[in-house]
Image (tube, rainbow, N blue to C red):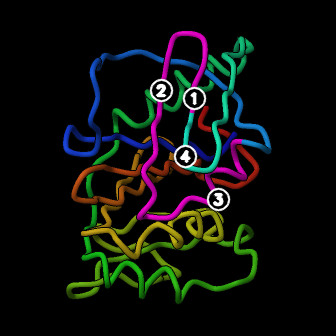
Amino acid sequence: CGVYARVDLLPSAVRGERFGRGTTNVDFNQPMLSTLAAMRASDVVDLAVGSGEVELATGRETVVEKRVKLPVRWLKGFVEVQTCLSRMALRLETSGPEAARFLRSLPRMKTNRRETWIVPSGRSVRLSQCPARDAVRVGGLERLRALEGLVSDAQSLCGYADEATGASAWELIFDDSRFHLALSPEVWRGFS
């Protein structure tokens, strides 16, 4: 419950007949995860999000995930995340290549037992063991590794902080989309 991820597709990222807003809650099972893992940047992919299902079609296969009912505790958690995100303030920004270099340099061990800050350093960012101006605190640096596989095509990485809770949010900016990763203050707790 301590990690929240979201992808925002900009109009240039999609071609289609109908667009709208809404939410379809699905649980990605192994067939969907395997199909997503096998996709390449050159693949043509059709994604259909309806009120009852999400369908992903590649040239090789089609996978469908049906809508699931969310438990009330999950809904409460999503509300907490949105409240936290609404308070986030931009603290740092670095280019895509600098972000890739930084993410590759992160320690490979678990870091959830100590406080770590990411601080601006010239045109890049670096780790620090003490707070500084415009620093973003991260509990469990290993959770940032989720960005490592995506950053190679990113234009930039932005870091946000919520002073009230100590949570952080990370945004990878691409030509046609945005990827958001929000982290609770500690690995062992959620956003409440």
Q: As displayed, is residue 98 above or below residue 166?
A: below
Q: Quadrant of residue 91?
A: bottom left
Q: Residues within 10 Å of mark 1 (few under 14, many from 20)?
A: some
Q: Residues within 10 Å of mark 4 (few under 14, many from 20)?
A: some
Q: Disc 3 on helix, strand or loop?
A: helix
Residue at (26% x, 36% y) in the render: 15
Q: Nearer the viewer, residue 171 or 185?
A: 171
Q: Residues within 10 Å of mark 2 (few under 14, many from 20)?
A: few
Distance of mark 1 from mark 3, alpha carbons?
15 Å
Q: Reply yes or no: does residue 160 show up in magenta.
A: no
Marking on residue 48? 2
Q: Nearer the viewer, residue 52 or 25?
A: 52
For disc 4, the marked residue is 58
Q: Earlier in the sequence, mark 4 or mark 3?
A: 3
Q: Earlier in the sequence, mark 1 or mark 3?
A: 3
Q: Position of residue 131 (x, y in %)?
A: 43, 72
For disc 3, the marked residue is 37
Going by the numbered disc 3, the residue's amino acid type is Ala
Could you tell whether 67 is left or right of 113 in the image? left
Residue at (55% x, 51% y) in the render: 183
Distance of mark 4 from mark 1, alpha carbons?
10 Å
Q: Reply yes or no: does residue 36 show up in magenta.
A: yes
Residue numbers of the magenta segment: 32-55
